[in-house]
Image: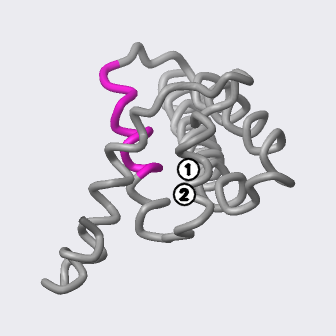
Amino acid sequence: MREACAQLARAEVADLCLGKLFAKAPYGEDGVWPCEPLREVIEDLQSEDMARGICNGIYNARGVYYRGEGGAQEREIAEKYRVWSNALQFSHPFVAARVLGQVVRRYEAEASREDTEAGVRRRMFT
């Protein structure tokens, strides 16, 4: 599929879409996300576009959620992905750094933004 899309000058879009699909992968036997076969595929391909698609897929899969004050929810999610990243850093460095690390950075940035907005709201209403 990737080869056919590349022939049509759609390699980037193909990898983004594959990444979004891969974001729905199950956990591995070891309890770490993603499952072992997918880790191998991602590690072998080392596609930045696929990594971006996975990150977007994970972020969008969160759906509707209750917004508490500050970024505690986002930090909790970031920590979950950080633990998985640490577990894979030697066996699957691309998956750990580029895929899971990207998810961690995105949720940490979101947490920081939510903390800032909560601080502004407190100052405005006190």
Q: Is residue 106 above or below residue 71?
A: below
- Whether residue 56 appears in magenta in the rendering, the answer is yes
Name the residue nearer the viewer: 101 or 95. Answer: 95
Residue range highlighted in magenta: 54-64
* Residue 12 falls in image quadrant: bottom left
Looking at the rendered structure, the kind of residue marked 1 is Arg
User: What residue is shown with label 2?
Assistant: 42
| Residue 82 rendering spot, x and y as whole percentages | 74, 39
Q: In the image shown, does 40 or 25 lie closer to the viewer?
A: 40
Q: Which residue is at 54% across, 57% downward? A: 42
Residue 75 x %, y %: 67, 31
For the stretch drawn in magenta, what is the main secondary structure? helix
> Which residue carries the number 1 mark?
106
Horizontal and vertical percent position of residue 6: 24, 82
Number of numbered labels in the structure image? 2
Q: Is residue 1 left or right of residue 47?
A: left
Q: In this view, does 54 lie to the left or right of 102?
A: left
